[in-house]
Image: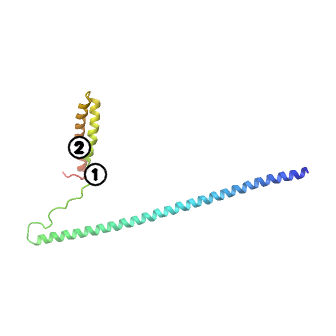
Amino acid sequence: MKRILVVIALSSVMFACNNKAKEEAALKQQEAEKQLAIKAVKDSLRLDSFKKAEVARVEKEKEAKHQAELAAARRSSTSARRSYASSGGSSSSAYGGTQPTARKKGWSDAAKGAVIGGAAGAVGGALIDKKKGRGAIIGGLVGAGGGYLIGRGEDRKSGRVQN
């Protein structure tokens, strides 16, 4: 009877150890499959983004080609107008002068500088002067003027304002 109990105990221990190893192997296999599935999804997303980038690049090239064709057409039409005007014997141009350039939208650097300088000057003036209102007004005016001049210089550098 003791031998039977020892054999049963040893066999149950062996099965218990062997069963956990199988479960662990199955869990590792499932984890590996999940990792492969995640990698496949990431790769497909990456391929999709490459395809989208390629389509965007092709569209940009088409747009650039179209813009170049329009520019060439404009150049040829303006040269035709100029030759027509010069061959007509008249000193006045049929073209009518320069075309207006596209204006930049939004705040100019001068306006931004004036606002920022005015706010900083007002705060500084209020802190420095004993009479807060007077200091804020004077500081705001000086700061706005200085900010405007600095911003106007930046506008000239960027080409927004001609000299």
Q: Residues within 10 Å of mark 2 (few under 14, many from 20)?
A: many
Q: Secondary structure at mark 1?
A: loop
Question: Left of 66 or right of it: where is 14?
Answer: right
Q: Position of residue 20 (x, y in %)?
A: 73, 54
Which residue lies most toward the front here?
133
**Residue on which disc 1 sits:** 106
Sequence order check, earlier mark of 2 and 1? 1
**Residue on which disc 2 sits:** 148
Question: Left of 34 or right of it: where is 102?
Answer: left
Q: Position of residue 16 (x, y in %)?
A: 77, 53
Q: Secondary structure at mark 2?
A: helix
Disc 2 or disc 1, which is closer to the eye? 1
The image quarter containing residue 78 is bottom left
Residue pictured at 29% horizontal, 30% vertical: 127
Q: From the viewer's perspective, is residue 143 above or below residue 80? A: above
Q: Amino acid at mark 2?
A: Tyr
Q: CA distance from mark 2 to mark 1?
A: 16 Å
Q: From the viewer's perspective, is residue 122 above or below residue 34? A: above
Cβ atoms under marks 2 and 1 closer than 8 Å: no
Q: From the viewer's perspective, is residue 113 above or below residue 133? A: below
Question: Left of 84 or right of it: where is 139?
Answer: right
Toward the viewer: 48 or 134? 134
